[in-house]
Image: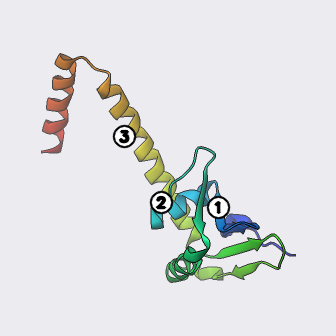
Amino acid sequence: MIFLNAKTFLMIYKNSGKFYNVFGIDAYVLNYFFDYKILNNNKAGFPDNAIDRVIEKLQKEKISYQIIYKDKDPIIKDFKKLNKYSKLIDDIKNEVELKQRFDLLTEKIKKLDEKKFLEVIECIEKCIE
């Protein structure tokens, strides 16, 4: 089996079960497109019956991908110069960073006493008007 450069491909893995899995930043891609849950180990998965929908979306968005099977040759779709995987990754990394910052602020705000909480809320409201 020959695997192309994974840094330019979304990598989908199919083992012997009924699920496909993606790892690392690719889990965030599937979360971005399909709202699939990302587990603590930066893994996302989807059932066999969703693979056509996933492939259709990746092709529509011009995202190069590889589907790696345990017991057969991989399926490889390379959009070459049209591949938007790297750009998408940059966008997702920025979005994830903003969400993490927002979540951290939310946790800090939840821990404030009532007086400080109201001050912060007033300040936020003024900033977004």
| Foreground tag (3 vs 2) | 3
Q: Earlier in the sequence, mark 2 or mark 1?
A: 1
Q: Which mark is residue 109?
A: none
SS under mark 1:
strand
Q: Is residue 103 left or right of residue 50?
A: left
> On the image, which quarter does residue 62 sit in?
bottom right
Mark 2 or mark 1, which is nearer to you? 1
Tell me: 74 left or right of 20.
right
Along the line of sight, which residue is nearer the eye, 99 or 126? 99
Q: Amino acid at mark 2?
A: Asp
Residue at the spot of label 3: 102
Q: Where does the image place residue 92, in percent across and percent down from the top left?
A: 49, 58
Spot occupied by residue 73 in the image (x, y as percentages of width and height): 82, 79
Which residue is most to the right? 1
Quadrant location of the C terminus?
Answer: top left
Amino acid type for the residue under numbered disc 1: Val
Q: Which part of the image, by quadrant, shows the N terminus?
A: bottom right
Instruction: Kindly identify which residue carries mark 2.
Output: 91
Number of other residues with Cα within 10 Å of mark 3, as a class: few under 14, some 14 to 19, many 20 or more: few
| Amino acid type at image mark 3 | Phe
Position of 92 compared to 6: left or right? left
Q: Which residue is mark 1?
A: 22
